[in-house]
Image (cartoon, coloured by chain):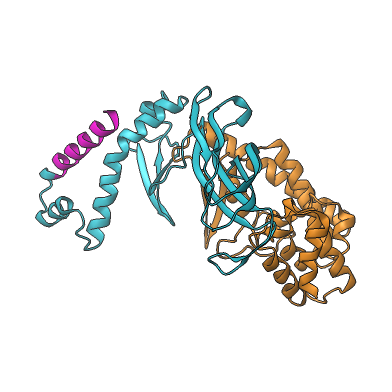
Amino acid sequence: MNYGEKISGAYVIPINEFSESILVLVKIFIVSTDGKKTEMLQEKEINLQEGEGPKIGVDEIIITKKYGIGSYSIRARMIALEGKDRLLPDGSKIEKGKILYDRVNQKFYIETDPKESGPCRFQPHGRDDKNYLFDWEEEEDGYVIYFNDWHPRIKQIASNEEELTNYLTEQGSMLALQIRLEELVGDDDKEDEELAKLIKDKDISAVYKLFLSRHSEFLWDIKK
Amino acid sequence: MVIKIIKKDKSKEVIQYKSVKKILTPEDIKEADRFDNALNHEIREIEKVLLEKKMLTPEARKSNMLGAWYLIGTRINRFLKKYKISSEEENLFWDHLYGRSVLISKTSPTSKISKTRNDFKIASLLAHHPITKLKKIRLWALWREIITYKAFKDERVLNWVIKRLEEEPPKTRDAGRPFLKAVSARLKRIDTTVLNNRELTSKLIEVVR
């Protein structure tokens, strides 16, 4: 989400499934992932009758700079404000302070993207070498792909994060295919039939054709 | 913030730059190097102060474990005020504080260490409390336990636990552990903020009754 945008319908409706009323405190709040920042949207003490209670929360949240860049959750909690002679499904008793409901209802990211996942990460590693544009190395949780930021093709875009990201993302498909091919040569995994056939047939002329077609497909999808 | 990691692999040294970002720019690397130099400088300063105050011996023995870690935590907190680290990268930071000083931590954990067991993270949390309070329980190992319990975040619970441990001080961490576990179990799924002092105390007393 970006500054100025809105989140609609940040509210909860408490439900009492017991056959008697209970005094509860319902809170709905925003909390940063590290737990350091909290903002109460609404908290209300209610005598919750059997069935649905009132709507608690806000109709919209406007994302302003007061939140800071990062990831946040909208969280709701219902706490008993009185004891009851009844047990909860986990066998514990209802006493004052007991948390009856505590859930993250929605996660959102302000001026940042969700944590990226994937087996590859890119790291610059410059070297005065015409033959080297990319290199890679296996690490504990995937591959690190080194790119030569001294290479004129990359040097011209290295200081522009957006351009660099676009370029590396585009190249990423070819590199991923090459890495996958190396993996397949090394073991008998037949998950990718086309790549497996390539290895079996030993037809070098088919390699670039397949790579180009996959690369094209990848670019089509990301640029669409 | 990108974290620079130096791994010593038998004969060679491997440098990695890690972050939640999947694509690092040359500027990210420069920033990570600057941060790493500043952090190493801070660690050297901490070592110097610990040696001067005789909390640490040149043989890497801490004569005053609690005091030494308190000082380390205080200095790290001050460092983190200057160099902001995102919550996503915080774990990387804590993990890779190990291995920077053989005086502070003689050995580095061989496997990944959780935040609740990381000495530096624990020291940082403890440094938010006054040292006079911490000195009431002198065992660093017991503090390592106490600070990680979620239920003790309520200052009133923490103070009550400290008072009990002062009255009947356990000789070791293991001796103190059952009491801490019992308090934590009693307050499981309880939001203590809605309880007044009398209500809270009556729940806590059930543990020792």
Magenta stretch holds residue A217: yes
Q: Is residue B124 left or right of residue B16?
A: right
In magenta, the rendered stretch is A207-224
Query: Secondary structure of the magenta portion, mostly?
Result: helix
* Image-quadrant location for residue B31: top right
Q: Is residue B99 left or right of residue B112?
A: right
Q: Position of residue B152 (x, y in %)?
A: 74, 59
B191 and A13: which is toward the camera: A13
At x 25%, y 60%, the residue is A186
Q: Position of residue B92 (x, y in %)?
A: 58, 50
Q: Position of residue A174 (x, y in %)?
A: 26, 40
Q: Position of residue B176 (x, y in %)?
A: 77, 73
Palette colour of chain B: orange
At x 73%, y 67%, the residue is B183
Residue B64 in sight in this render: no
* Image-quadrant location for residue A197: bottom left
Residue B70, compared with residue B172, is above or below; it is above
Residue B143 in sight in this render: yes
At x 15%, y 42%, the residue is A210
* Chain cyan in the figure, letter: A
Q: Is residue A221 left or right of residue B162?
A: left
